[in-house]
Amino acid sequence: MSPETLLLIALGAVAVVTAVRWIGERTGLPAAALLPLIGILYALLPGPNIELEPHIVLTFILPPLLYSAALDSSLLAIRANLRIVIGLSVLLVLATALLIGAGFALFVTGATLAAGVAVGAAVAPPDPVAALAVGRKVGLPPRLITIIQGEGLLNDATALTILNVAVAAAVGGHFSFPMAAGLFLLAAVGGAAVGIGVAFAVRMLRPIAKDALLANAVSLVTPFVAYLVGERLHVSGVLAVVVAGLIVGHDTPRSGTGAGRLQTSAVWRFVDFLLEGLVFLLIGQQLPAVLRGLRQYDTGTIVTALAISVGVTLLLRPAWLALTQAAHLLLRREDEGLTWREIVALSWAGTRGVISLAAVFTIPLTTDAGKPFPDRDLLLFCTFVVVLVTLVGQGLTFAPLVRLLGLRHNEVDEARMRNEARAAAVHAALDRLDDLEEDEPAERPEIDALRTKLRERLRRYEHRLDVLQNADSDELPVSERYEAALRIRRLAIEAQRDELLRRRDAGSLPDEALRRLERELDHEERVLPDRPN
């Protein structure tokens, strides 16, 4: 494929991803469910196609996506829900892999336990991108968002470790449970240790990387460093990336500069948008490669394998959640359990994604004896169908299900919490000004001016808290005065921007000065709440 052709495909893919995002914002349909369908349509057309290279996905795409998700997660919230997160991301993944493996060994003609466990490990880890995108849009409660995030961060490491053990058993023809358990423990503990070490190194670099561009550079290379170090030490590079991201994300508010945090956040949002969109397009384009080797299997074998793969994937998750909740009630644990509505929502949040395809494509073509890997083409097809069924089926129906269940976070409580934190922060600033006034009496005029501004801000926060305390519903009360003030501030910013542009066009303001002044207006506009146009 020529560079020009590759560039055209890349530009076309970016155009499609952008268009689908635009459509999704206006229809409420998740882009993660629409893009694979478009990829399938493209794959069926004549012309060049891009086949998935699993090692490229695992090395260049998975680390930044996991790291960005970890930066956006809450270490404290995950720790508070650790029992549920570990159950879903470790134990459920293991149970899914073993149950599918047993089903293949018992009911699929010629299939081995190791091959079945391999495909089970590939389809076991959910990719939470679609569920999270929909969940945030429909107002899913923060606790469920945290559980879905935490599961998505940790389950890939579990699945890839199980897959490696299963493939080794299928290729070499021998399996040792103690050895497999030891390898899993070593990968997990070693990966976590590498992640902690990388996060500590990033913390040491923070005083040096004060410049926003340097902070961006450090942030972008961190997931690749964590992954490569983990893989070089033969531990879980995926877990190293996740642990590093969780710790760095937890430390970010107390270190670095405001400019660095703003710019780094914008960069990672763009990386997520681009990589996730291209990845979901790539999923659909794998259809020809998956169908290529199916001719050797009879229809009954294919149907049986699909029934086991899809059935276990869809049915084991709700059963697991229900059984673990029943055990929670019987044991009377102190941590908060799940309601039946939350169990239903989490059961339908198990969409699979590119990690499953990348994992199953890493299965080698032959065994150590030189024979073809048992049922490799069938395993690829089963994985593709599971990904497509969950991504499209669950992805498109998750929002209506959440609305039907009536699961929605309390906007008033969240706004009250934020305003209480704002008021407390202003009180802390006023106390600091009182101390500064005693130490620096010569700066009293500047201190008094800032104190006046802070007290006016505190007055607004306290008024907003009074309104929220008296709210009659879970929805945010709308203040006509507040909305009018937002509209007036936006009009004032727009007038300033127009005047700066007029001066630039008239030749009285250089472009460099315009960019600096416009950046000041952009920051002022950025702090205003978003409102639909």
Image (cartoon, helix red, strand yellow):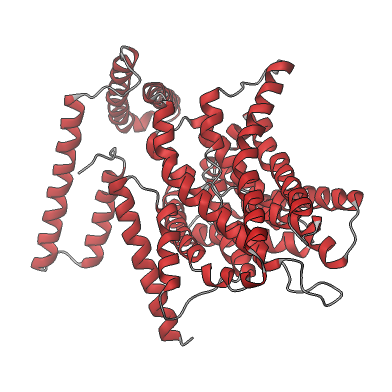
Looking at the picture, tell me which residue is in the foreground, 52 or 432: 52
The residue drawn where x is 26% and y is 45% is: 525
The residue drawn where x is 74% and y is 49% is: 103
Quadrant in which the C terminus appears: top left
Up the image or down, 282 lies above or below 33; here it is below
Q: Quadrant of residue 437?
A: top left
Looking at the picture, tell me which residue is in the foreground, 516 or 85: 85
Q: Is residue 495 left or right of residue 188?
A: left
Q: Is residue 277 left or right of residue 54?
A: left
Looking at the picture, tell me which residue is in the foreground, 469 or 261: 469
Q: Quadrant of residue 378?
A: bottom right
Residue 322 lies, in percent from the top left, at: 64, 27
The residue drawn where x is 71% and y is 56% is: 160
The residue drawn where x is 50% and y is 49% is: 129
Residue 255 lies, in percent from the top left, at: 54, 44
Q: Is residue 495 left or right of residue 405?
A: left
Residue 136 lies, in percent from the top left, at: 42, 39
Up the image or down, 172 lies above or below 475; here it is below
Residue 327 lies, in percent from the top left, at: 71, 22
Q: Most extreme residue toward the bottom, as rendered?
A: 2
Q: Is residue 354 left or right of residue 111?
A: left
Total marks in image:
0
Residue 63 seen from this side: no
